[in-house]
Amino acid sequence: QRPERQAFQDRLAASRAPLADAAGVLGGPTLARMVALGTSVSALGIATGMVVVTPRYLSALAQNTRLGFGLERMSARGVPLRALAVTWVLVAVLIQTGSRGQLFALSSVSVLLQYLVTAAALVVLGRRRERGLTPRHAWVSVPAIAVALVLGSGASAREAVVAAAAVLLGLMLRLLSSRRAATPRLDVPRGGN
């Protein structure tokens, strides 16, 4: 039975649709089609979420800062057009240097990072007794942090490097923003009498 299991694992490793193929082995072609449809809908949801949410993140992060890129500006229809353009450029670069599958995996890694940061913030806010939280509220974050770290350990080296680069870029932009905010702004009158 070992050689059969190894052959099956090798086929799954080489498969373009491993979930559907595994479902086909377990439940036949009908289950395989259902799982294939489900993974396609899931991928579409991830892609839509990236297109809709990522520019909003950039816009929200640029609020009340002096980054100078205008990422917080909204169009007349409430769309952060500059943040959308930056998102499109970054996605295009990632697709050109990798694959859609890698982009979806990177999206999953970024969601894990969001959970990890949120759970860590709960620990800090609970410890500081801010926003009505106490240290006993922070215990919920312990399993969340553990699960995020375990799931994140499954990321490929490339995904980890890209995620780390994105975090470092964000930290550098935050540092730049805080330095610019600390620098007094000289308002020079324009025009004269």
Image (spheres, rainbow, N blue to C red):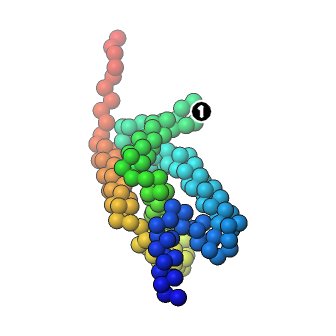
The amino acid beneath tag 1 is: Arg
Residue 91, given in percent of the width and then of the height, sits at: 43, 46
**Horizontal arrangement in the rendering, residue 95 relative to residue 137 (left or right):** left
Query: How far across and down, in percent of the image, does residue 131 sit?
Result: 54, 65
Q: Is residue 154 visible?
A: yes
Q: Position of residue 116 (x, y in %)?
A: 46, 68
Q: For mark 1, give the secondary structure.
A: loop
Q: Position of residue 39 (x, y in %)?
A: 60, 60
**Quadrant location of the C terminus in the rendered image:** top left
Q: Residue at x 34, y 15 (%)?
A: 191
Report which residue position mark 1 lands on.
Answer: 77
In this view, the residue in front, 63 or 86, is 86
Residue placed furthest toward the bottom: 1
Q: Residue at x 62, y 74 (%)?
A: 25
Residue 120's image quarter? bottom left
User: Which residue ends up furthest to the right in the rendered image?
Assistant: 30
